[in-house]
Image (cartoon, rainbow, N blue to C red):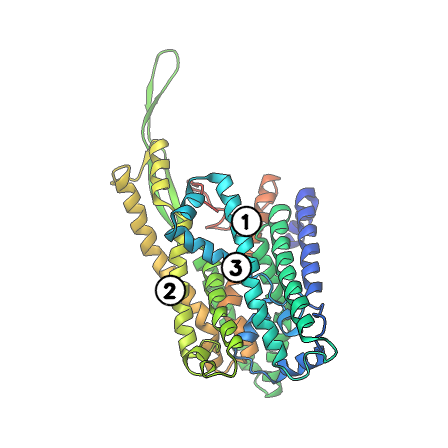
Amino acid sequence: MKLFTVIKNIWSIKELRQRILFTLALLLIYRVGTFVVLPGVVPAALEKSAQNRNANDLLGLINIFTGGAFDNAAIFALGVMPYITASIIVQLLGFAVPYFQRLQTKEGESGRKRLNQITRILTVAITLVQGGGYLQLIRSIPGAVSPEIPDSLFWFTNIIILTAGTIFCMWLGERITDKGIGNGVSLIIQAGIIARLPQAFVFEFQNLFGDNRPLLFLLELAFFFVIVLATILVIQGVRRIPIQFAKRMVGRSGTSLPTAGARDYLPLKVNSAGVMPIIFAQALMFLPATVIQYVSGSQVDTGRVHMFSDIYSMGYNIAFFLLIVIFTYVYTALMINPTNYAEYLKRSNAFIPGVKPGEATSEYIDNIMTRITLPGAVFLGLIGILPSIAATLGVNQQFALFFGGTTLLIMVGVALDTLQVIESYLLTQKYDGLIKSGRIQGRASSGVQIGQPQ
């Protein structure tokens, strides 16, 4: 009954209702675009090729991220992945190039607008490169391109269409972030993932029940449930640093009385970077597959380079694990600035017991962040390579992609972020939250909240 009451409360808030409907409408437009085939492409040949292709390659994972648009040769075949790749490059340039450092930290809103413009321009360039590799892949499939279409016309029109499709997906994400329920780009990726989940689930169900192994299927679901709980625990986990406000004198009519210093805490997340490291790492892992499409048939298509196109190979998983750990630290450094925390505490006349204000406080917070980020980064890395482990243990490869890895982290992370937005609307309207007791800890928790750059 409480669930229906919460749904009724959500629907009764006009602004929240409008934002949810607006988000669903844009996601529906995106899903429709994943079925609109590029001109000159024969869908039957693509479907046959997808059936014959091994599910353990990187192209299959790309297809899941795009909600089937990749195998359909749709106008949204590349999705928002070029935009994610461009965002990675811009973020990394912020560490190495002083101009980008200044835009990120010192020029405020104008700097963010300039970075957005640079990211969009870079997205177009990356889409042109990845689009060329994608069209080369389509041409390598027998019968996939209609012989009635001239070669030059096929390349020219479809490169433009793929680029326009990626830009349109990026625009949809921005509109969802501004006028919807937020996290637009992540929601678009999640929509593509969820669209493929029922098919993988039914396939695994039919496979195990057809072999008279229903107990194994239930065991898989139990482990999946445990992994989801562990993922939620790490994403929401926080380390609370106790702080104390200095005593101050208050009083009236010339009389002053000392008041005891108030106590509070700084909530530092175990996984401050959220879902972005796994997305960034996955986007970079797409690059070898693009290179392989350009050099297909040559000696580079075999050996070490080709190993990185197989998501179940040892080389791929080692590189993927390391990238996740690295990007977790990188993105945490971008999101959490210990100096800002120390300055905020000093301005608020607060301090951490036993730690001197100023530089000592900054170093103390930095040391704690480094320590608590390590287990979070390792956990994200292990979740990232879990599909290969599940497939090795006998889980069907299609379902193994959802058993862990990028798909699980995105679904859980984006779902928690969306729940946070809905929770905040319910609380501001004096309604009960989404859970009976407590709040979505680590996301809508109490404690001293310090602004962080987005």
* Cα–Cα span, label 1 and label 3: 14 Å
x, y percent for residue 413: 52, 58
Q: Earlier in the sequence, mark 1 or mark 3?
A: 3
The residue pinned by badge 1 equals 117
Q: Residue furthest top?
A: 253
Q: Amino acid at mark 3?
A: Ile
- Categorize mark 2 by other alpha carbons within 10 Å: few (<14), some (14-19), many (20+): some
Q: Which mark is residue 84?
A: 3
x, y percent for residue 115: 50, 48
Judge whether 116 appears above or below 314 on screen: above
Quadrant in which the N terminus appears = bottom right
x, y percent for residue 347: 36, 31
Q: Quadrant of residue 206?
A: bottom right
Q: Which mark is residue 129?
A: none
Q: Earlier in the sequence, mark 2 or mark 3?
A: 3
Mark 3 element type: helix
Judge whether 427 appears above or below 295 on screen: above
Q: Amino acid at mark 1?
A: Gln
Mark 1 element type: helix
Q: Residue furthest bottom?
A: 211
Q: Is residue 351 left or right of residue 393?
A: left
* Cα–Cα span, label 1 and label 2: 34 Å
**Nearest the camera: 413 or 50?**
50
The mark lying in front, picked from 2 and 3, is 3
At a point 41% along the width and 79% down the height, the residue shown is: 304
Residue 411 seen anywhere in this rendered image of the structure: no
The residue pinned by badge 2 equals 378
At a point 68% along the width and 55% down the height, the residue shown is: 26
* Cα–Cα span, label 2 and label 3: 22 Å
- Categorize mark 3 by other alpha carbons within 10 Å: few (<14), some (14-19), many (20+): many
